[in-house]
Amino acid sequence: MATQPQLRLTPEEYLGQERRAEAKSEFHDGEVLAMAGASYVHNLIVANVIRELGTQLKGRPCTVLPSDVRVRIEASNRYVYPDVTVVCGEPAFTDREQDTLVNPTLLVEVLSKATSNYDRGEKFEHYRTLESFAEYVLLAQDRPHCEHYVRQADGRWILTETSRLDDVLSLTTIGCELALGEAYDKVSFGPRPA
């Protein structure tokens, strides 16, 4: 049985459509992918991270932004919505609408079963093509666990991991700290299956 060819859009067509849409979609080299809604726990972790970083960045040259700001990855022709974005210095946008950032410094993704492989793999690979991008934080939502990647001067990425709520991440590129216990404030983890 033949399938209908999928309609491919140009970046301009995507942005025009996306700016009028009620729901968010990502753009992957011509394909538009609808984004699923996030869970309560996912949103709680995102809110906690934004609160913690926003408080520390007050009066400083970096700004924390929620997931409504798109990030353009020119090298792979993608528009994506990170869960949390931090930009340092003057933000650079694709156009005067100022809703699509091209120079993030730090990105945070909250992992789910559906997105964890993509966020760790292909999405991270695309993010690494951004010159300004220097730090990546992945937070599990089903248990306390953090993967923290930092770009080194020679271009290598160093990973540290923790599952201890009393650990504190040193976010060197933005001069902040993120206590894991604060990122997971008010999050209840149910019993783990045997």
Image (cartoon, helix red, strand yellow):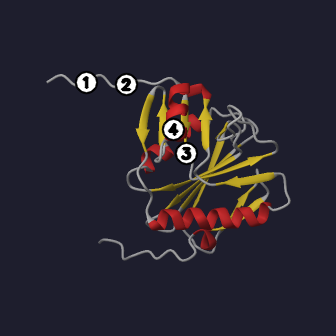
Q: Residues within 10 Å of mark 3 (few under 14, many from 20)?
A: many
> What is the spatial separation of the Cα atoms under label 2 and label 4, in whole angstroms?
15 Å
Mark 4 to mark 3 CA distance (whole Å): 12 Å
Which of the two labelled residues, at mark 3 and mark 2, occupies the earlier sequence position?
2
Label 3 sits on residue: 81
Q: Left or right: 158 with respect to 27?
A: right
Instruction: Say what secondary structure mark 1 lies in.
Output: loop
Q: Secondary structure at mark 2?
A: loop
- Determine whether label 4 and label 1 are within 8 Å by CB: no
Most foreground residue, 110 or 70: 70
Is residue 172 shown left or right of residue 83?
right
Q: Quadrant of the C terminus?
A: bottom left
Residue 56 position in % (x across, y down): 78, 64
Callout in the foreground (4, 1): 4
Residue 141 percent coordinates (x, y): 47, 64
Q: Residue type at mark 2?
A: Leu
* Residue drawn at (38%, 51%) of the image: 114
Q: Nearer the viewer, residue 38 or 190?
A: 38
- Whether residue 87 can be seen here: yes
The residue lying at 76 percent from left, 39 percent from top is: 153
Mark with earlier residue (3, 1): 1
Question: How far apart in space, not on screen, are marks 3 and 2 (Cα)?
Answer: 21 Å
Q: Earlier in the sequence, mark 2 or mark 4?
A: 2
Read off the residue under disc 4. 18
Q: Residue at x 43, y 49 (%)?
A: 115
| Disc 2 residue crowd, few under 14, some 14–19, many 20+, Cα 10 Å | few
